[in-house]
Image (tube, rainbow, N blue to C red):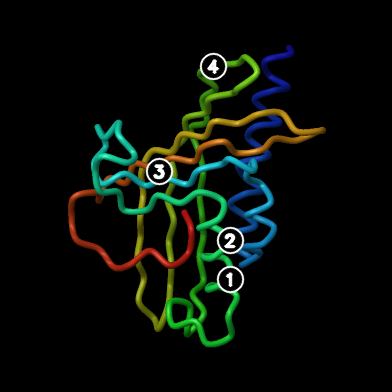
């Protein structure tokens, strides 16, 4: 029963993260990260080296703060006009449960801007640690199925 409760709590956390992104609450999304948290979108699904290879996105909390500041600026080109997004998180599997919880899931993000719809999807891995009655993100890795291909710039976090 304890593992079902943990699975429910983690699933709820991932759903809340997706909701924050869809609502444009980027400051609150940033608060989900631990001080040493990393947001990573590798350029290939088999990429294991964050720093020795080019990544689509590799940001620590300091860079995430800059991203959030840019997204919040009233004249930010990357979000003008403001996109509407839907993040769908499913197939949530807890792999490791120690002081660090490893969670694998599937992600589909649909963005609509200027009547143009863009869909990005892939496999997500979160490394979480307990923080009060919730969690903090140590690592969020998104392996896009489009990685290695051509797609528009990613303005809204996945």
Q: Earlier in the sequence, mark 3 or mark 4?
A: 4
> Total of numbered circles in the picture?
4
Q: Earlier in the sequence, mark 2 or mark 4?
A: 2
The residue most toward the left is 149
List the residue tagged with mark 4: 96
- The local secondary structure at tag 4 comes to strand
Measured Cα–Cα span from mark 3 to mark 2: 19 Å
Determine which of the numbered discs, if any, sits on residue 13 in the image. none
- The local secondary structure at tag 2 comes to helix
List the residue tagged with mark 1: 69
Residue 98, image quadrant: top right
Q: Earlier in the sequence, mark 3 or mark 2?
A: 2
Measured Cα–Cα span from mark 2 to mark 4: 29 Å
Measured Cα–Cα span from mark 4 to mark 1: 34 Å
Residue 119, image x and y in percent?
Answer: 35, 60
- Residue in the image at 30% along x and 34% along y: 49
86 up-or-down from 84: above or below: above
Tag 2 and tag 1, C-beta contact below 8 Å: yes
Is residue 88 left or right of 1 when viewed as pictured? left
List the residue tagged with mark 2: 65
**Label 1: how many Cα within 10 Å (few below 14, some 14–19, many 20+):** few
Residue 40, image x and y in percent?
Answer: 41, 45
């Amino acid at each position: 029963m304890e593992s079902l409760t943990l699975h429910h709590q983690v699933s709820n956390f991932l759903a809340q993260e997706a909701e924050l992104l869809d609502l444009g609450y980027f400051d609150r999304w940033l608060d989900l990260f631990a001080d040493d948290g990393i947001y990573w979108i590798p350029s290939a699904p088999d990429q294991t080296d964050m720093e020795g290879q080019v990544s689509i996105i590799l940001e620590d909390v300091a860079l995430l703060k800059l991203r959030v500041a840019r997204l919040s600026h009233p004249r930010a080109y990357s979000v003008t006009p403001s996109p509407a997004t839907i993040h769908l998180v499913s197939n949530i599997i807890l792999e490791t449960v120690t002081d660090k919880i490893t969670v694998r899931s599937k992600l589909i993000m649909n963005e609509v801007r200027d009547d143009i719809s863009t869909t990005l999807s892939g496999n997500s891995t979160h490394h979480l640690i307990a923080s009060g009655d919730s969690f903090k993100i140590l690592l969020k890795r998104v392996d896009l199925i489009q990685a290695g291909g051509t797609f528009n710039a990613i303005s809204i976090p996945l």
